[in-house]
Amino acid sequence: SGAFSAIVAFPFEQIGVLLRRLSLSGMIGNVIAFLIYFLVCLIPCFAYLMMKKKHRTCREDFVLPAMSVMLLIVIYYMINPGLLHVSVPGTGKWMLGACFYSGLFGYLILRVISAAVSADTKRLQKMIIVLLAGINIAFIYAICSQQFGSLLTSIMELRNANTASGFEFDMGSTVSGLEFTYLLFVVQFLADALPYALDIVIVFLAMQVIHELEEDRYSDQAIHATEKLAGFCVKALKATVVVSIAVNILQLIYCDVFYQINITITIPIVSIAFVLIILLYTRYVREDQKLKQENDSF
């Protein structure tokens, strides 16, 4: 979409426009634009030198000089968009921004993995807490933006299609059968948003487990929090599967009144594996507690 393309191109597009105007203002402006251009592009190199000075570099940090080279290319074409020839009009700036951000996020992921390998238990727990918080933000975004946006798009497309087909429709009138399809869209939205909502609860329960394990991994509170997480994961997986089946059956029963049908087959392999891992981990935690109590009794 246009909004997404603008986000991906930010702030490189704005920097390119600013430097282009500054360069065209005169000789002094051209020199200033040239200096700003190189200083901005050298930011990743400066970050690498600062980390090296503090002895905090790792192998993955050698990506930073390459990021400076990438910035040189991205901003150069943002300054001179006419030099970038693409077969699909309007995608040039989006492609430039997407390439840079893919490299940046790839570097950050590699950096986090490297830090996690050498981190102690407490630091690793903090990293997991931060990661879980970020995952929850992503889930909330998925519900409020992607899923709700898809709902509005589906409603508008159905409305426009039936208006073009000869139906006279406005917000104050109804078309026979069309309102049932709108209701179906809402039901599908709720069904699609349900896994994300349940995942948000799972993330909060996982944070509670990490907190209790940090306090005392052999305590009854830690065991209770782990079993609570495992139990909710099982219920969430069952609820997701049942709701998916119910929506399909609903469409089958009322297929003669719906103007659009969307039957889905849900096979949550990753969710099943995650639930099994949590259940297995719960068993291990419980057995560790029993061993600890037996050792303490001796």
Image: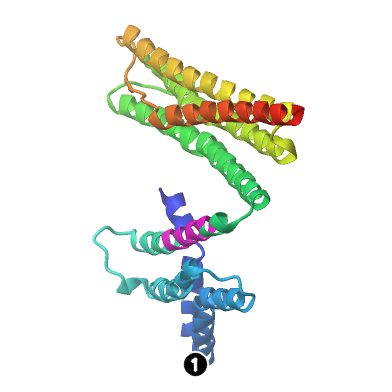
Q: Which of the pair 94/271 is nearer the observer?
A: 271
The quarter of the picture where residue 140 lies is top right
Q: Is residue 54 left or right of residue 99?
A: right
In the displayed structure, 78 sits above or below 294; it is below
Q: Residue furthest bottom?
A: 27
Q: Residue furthest left?
A: 87
Q: Is residue 87 left or right of residue 265?
A: left
In the displayed structure, 24 sits above or below 248; it is below
The residue singled out by tag 1 in the image is: 27
Where in the figure is residue 157, as x and y percent of width and height?
Answer: 36, 31
Where in the figure is residue 185, as x and y percent of width and height?
Answer: 42, 22
In magenta stretch: residue 104? yes
In magenta, the rendered stretch is 102-113
Q: Write the residue at 43% across / 30% down.
A: 273
Q: Which of the pair 246/148 is nearer the observer?
A: 246
The quarter of the picture where residue 91 lies is bottom left
Q: Which of the pair 191/76 is nearer the observer?
A: 191
For label 1, the SS is: helix
For the question of whether residue 232 can be seen, the reply is yes
The three-letter code of the residue at mark 1 reads Met
Q: Write the residue at 62% across / 26% down.
A: 286
Where in the figure is residue 246, as x and y percent of width and height?
Answer: 41, 12
**Quadrant the C terminus occupies:** top right
In the displayed structure, 74 sits above or below 152; it is below
Q: Which of the pair 189/43 is nearer the observer?
A: 43
Instruction: Report the predominant secondary structure element of the magenta stretch.
Output: helix
Q: Residue furthest top?
A: 253
Where in the figure is residue 248, as x and y percent of width and height?
Answer: 36, 15
